[in-house]
Image (cartoon, grey):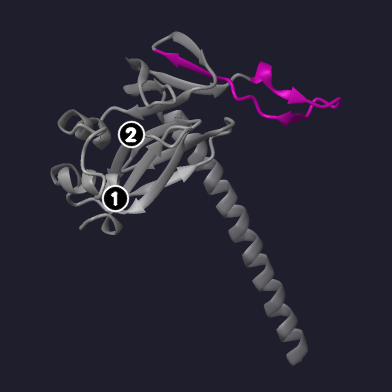
Amino acid sequence: MKIKSAKLILVIGVMLLVITMLSGCAMLNYEISGMMEALRGRAAVIKTYDEESNIIDKIEGQSISISSEDKFNTKDKEGNVVNQSSVISITVGGKSMVHVGSSLILHEKGLIDVFDEFSRKVDIQNFDRSTPFLNRMVNDMKNLTSGKSKVILIRSQSGKPLATFVGNNVSYFATGIDKSTGIQIDGKYLFIYRCDYTIYDLELLIN
């Protein structure tokens, strides 16, 4: 009798684990599709950068749509995708652009790029290098970081800072587009392509 009860408990436990895993996958897929869908119809800013972190172009618009340019996917004989395309297609207010290669950041309006604000005040090339760059920026921009718990530092492919955002509720997702990440910051959306990034607890950086 005890053996049957133990088996029953084990079966129930396995079933609950499977249900939880499936629910988690479904929730993740929902979050990803929701994140990408949420960009449509919202005002956003798109910037592309060279390896020296210089801005190549800046585009602002409404009704943003992002997708992989599937015609560049590599497929096997059965038609299955072997390598996802690194080419992205972006529609801004009914106008289109195709991008590949250089670092790209798209952020919904309402998100403040702390790095952009900091670089207007400080000669980044010449400031005191004895203080770590990010710590200096966070402490100098306390009016923008006060009350926040997370810092997202985005860097170019060569490791140079491109942008910095702060928020309390930060989560990140795969987007279905190669070499890209979607990040949600306090309900606002951030899409980064071909960039390095680190997410820190703010307390790690405050002196």
Residue 106, quarter of the rendered image: top left
Vertical order, 93 against 39 (above or below):
above
Residue that extends furthest to the left in the rendered view of this protein: 143
Q: Nearer the viewer, residue 148 or 156?
A: 156
Q: Nearer the viewer, residue 202 or 161?
A: 161
Q: Which mark is residue 66?
A: none
- Left or right side of 178 for 207: left
Does the segment drawn in magenta span residue 85? yes
Q: Amino acid at mark 1?
A: Asn
| SS category of the residue bearing label 2 | strand
Q: Nearer the viewer, residue 177 or 200?
A: 200
Rendering coords of residue 136 (x, y %): 22, 47
- Mark 1 crowd level (few <14, some 14–19, many ≥20, 10 Å Cα): some
- Mark 2 crowd level (few <14, some 14–19, many ≥20, 10 Å Cα): some
Q: Amino acid at mark 2?
A: Ala
Rendering coords of residue 157 (x, y %): 48, 33
**Which region is colored magenta?**
70-92
The residue under the point 34% across, 16% down is 58
Q: Which residue is mark 2?
A: 163
| SS category of the residue bearing label 1 | loop
Rendering coords of residue 205 (x, y %): 27, 54
Rendering coords of residue 59 (x, y %): 35, 15
Quadrant holding the N terminus: bottom right
Q: Which residue is mark 1?
A: 168
Does the segment drawn in magenta span residue 204? no
The residue under the point 28% across, 49% down is 132
The residue under the point 67% across, 79% down is 9
Quadrant holding the C terminus: bottom left
